[in-house]
Image (spheres, helix red, strand yellow):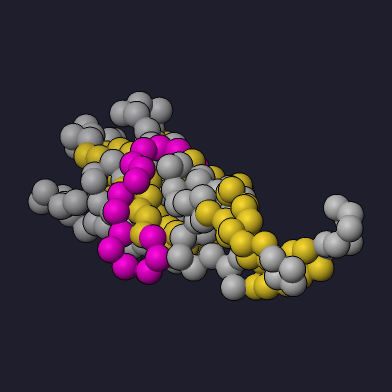
Amino acid sequence: WQANNNSGSTIYEIESSTGVDTAYGVIYTGYGLSYTHSALTPNVTYYYKVRARNLDTVYSGYTGAITTHTICNTPGNISFTTVAETAINLTWGTNNNSASTVYTLKSSSETNTNYQTIYSGPNNSFSHSSLTPNVTYYYKVYATNLDNISTNYNTPNSTHTRCNVPANLVFTSVNETSISVQWEANNNSGSTIYELYSSSETDTNFSLLLST
């Protein structure tokens, strides 16, 4: 703020309020014309006003109040709470950001590039559905404050959807010393490995025949 022609013996008193333009409290008293307000909460509205005091302890009126919003912290790490064949539930840390923070979640499949926005809102969790079985999905999040200023992305994290159970196991050829079988992928991706097991005489004691 400016001295506005006040002498060097003038004492200034700066007051601040959080969230609303009421309930101010003194945060600084002194001769200076600037102050750094620290230990604040990310993405919160802070109001400020100043008045001056002369040598007789007589106060001036207040300046008009000014307001700003603190920047958001970068969101915390992404964790996967449930991973199924076609859905992934994930969550991320708020990192002490206020409830007015907007989080933007982006996802990419197969590679850690070409991300697309899949969620933007106040929640720090999301259920990603309608996915392909056995595919790698990457995720990253950034936060936006009340002034529409965004953070950097947090560290990307990835996981793989589970495989569907193979479908329609059938015999394609049976002769004296060999049996040929085939099955359907059931929407599993091309990176899926299938294991074929066999048992003779009874439906127990299976052993691995093939992994491909």
- Residue at the spot x=18%, y=34% of the render? 64
Q: Quadrant of the C terminus?
A: bottom right
Horizontal and vertical percent for residue 89? 54, 45
Using the image as rendered, state which of residue 24 and residue 91 is in the foreground.
91
In this image, 76 relative to 102: left or right? right
Instruction: Point out the residue furthest to the front here.
Output: 176
Using the image as rendered, state which of residue 70 and residue 93 is in the foreground.
93
Residue 114 within the magenta-colored segment of the rendering: yes
Q: State the extent of the magenta-drawn residues as a range.
A: 109-126
Residue 83 within the magenta-colored segment of the rendering: no
Residue 195 visible to an observer of this rendering: yes
In this image, 193 relative to 111: left or right? right
Residue 13 falls in which quadrant of the image?
top left
Horizontal and vertical percent for residue 59? 27, 35
In this view, 177 is above or below 107: below
Horizontal and vertical percent for residue 38? 42, 55
Using the image as rendered, state which of residue 87 and residue 63 is in the foreground.
87
Instruction: Point out the residue furthest to the top here.
Output: 22
- Residue at the spot x=36%, y=59% of the render? 108
- Residue at the spot x=28%, y=41% of the render? 146
Using the image as rendered, state which of residue 31 and residue 68 is in the foreground.
68
Residue 126 visible to an observer of this rendering: no
Horizontal and vertical percent for residue 182? 58, 59
Q: How many discs appear?
A: 0
- Residue at the spot x=40%, y=65% of the render? 110
